[in-house]
Structure formats: C-alpha cells, structure tokens
Image (tube, grey):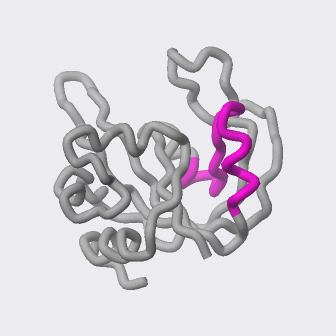
C-alpha cells in the first residue's frame, strides 16, 4: 500500500467528499499508473482567501482508493481560472477512511515531515496533484489529527 498526499482547493475537496471521486489534470496522467486500490490519499487543501479571511493550508481527511484509475471527461470539478478548460479527467473512486471535523492545519506539521526536505520552501513539495509520502509521515499526520490508523 502506498500513501499519497493529494493537493486540492476547498471546492474540489468538497466534490471529493460528496462524490467519492478524485481526479487529476491531464498533465498528471503518469501518476495514475502508480495508484492502486487500497492506497490511501491524505487530502491537502491549499491556503485560500475567502472574503477578508485567509484560510490556512490543511489536511482535510483520509480516503482509500477503491477503484483502478479511469478516464472520464465529464465536468465534475471546479477548474481554477489559471487552468483553462481542465476537467481533471484521470480519476479514481475513493472511500472515506476519516474526514476530519476540523481540517488539520498544515504549517505546524512541516518541521516533523520527512517528505518536506526544504522546510523554508515547503510549498514546492505540494505543487503537483499527488505525491507519495513515507509511512512515518502518514502516521504522524493521523496522530496529530487524532485518528487511529
């Protein structure tokens, strides 16, 4: 089993929670060849400005991959303005393992996460749709969220 951190905005994290489908952009097709049923996804939501408030980056929950990846061009996800007509066509079905009642703020985790090797420029480690993380980081995040693995 592989643990992944999957990067999203809040609107698409809500689609994931409602539809139990995760999708990645066309440019990330090669990642999907490595994802297998039984793998886990930690959903990382990026910092966003909403009205006058800045919502911090956070981990929203854990999902288990429940299907082989597939291709579907039906518009399901909100496309950020800078991504043009992207529909996130490379998808997989997922099942919730633990959706956190309060997202776990990400910045306090950074000093202790092994996959983030550059602690000052940490956001570069989360710019792709998905990346693998070590078991140790997965367990740390679950503990900090108060979830038993």
Instruction: Indicate whether residue 33 is drawn in magenta.
Output: yes
At a point 72% along the width and 48% down the height, the residue shown is: 91
Report the front residue among 60 and 122: 122
Q: Is residue 138 left or right of residue 74?
A: left
Report the front residue among 117 and 146: 117
At a point 37% along the width and 75% down the height, the residue shown is: 136
Report the front residue among 16 and 41: 41
Q: Position of residue 76 (x, y in %)?
A: 67, 36
Determine the image quadrant of residue 134: bottom left
Which residue occupies the extreme bottom position in the image? 148
Q: Which residues are magenta?
A: 16-35
Q: Position of residue 149 (x, y in %)?
A: 43, 83
At a point 72% along the width and 41% down the height, the residue shown is: 29
Name above or below for residue 62 compared with residue 53: below
Which residue occupies the extreme front position in the image? 117
Name above or below for residue 96 compared with residue 72: below
Q: Position of residue 109 (x, y in %)?
A: 23, 59
Instruction: Indicate whether residue 12 is drawn in magenta.
Output: no
Q: Is residue 71 left or right of residue 46?
A: right
Q: Position of residue 122 (x, y in %)?
A: 29, 43
């Amino acid at each position: 089993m592989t643990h992944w951190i999957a990067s999203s905005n809040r609107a698409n994290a809500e689609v994931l929670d409602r539809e139990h489908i995760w999708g990645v952009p066309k440019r990330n097709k090669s990642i999907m060849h490595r994802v297998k049923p039984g793998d886990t996804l930690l959903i990382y939501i990026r910092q966003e400005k909403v009205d006058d408030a800045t919502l911090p980056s956070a981990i929203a929950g854990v999902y288990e991959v429940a299907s082989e990846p597939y291709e579907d061009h039906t518009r399901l996800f909100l496309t950020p303005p800078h991504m043009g007509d992207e529909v996130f066509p490379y998808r997989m079905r997922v099942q919730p393992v633990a959706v956190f009642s309060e997202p776990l703020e990400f910045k306090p985790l950074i000093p202790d996460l092994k996959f983030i090797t550059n602690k000052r420029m940490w956001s570069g480690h989360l710019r792709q749709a998905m990346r693998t993380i070590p078991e140790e980081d997965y367990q740390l995040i679950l503990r900090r969220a108060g979830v038993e693995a």
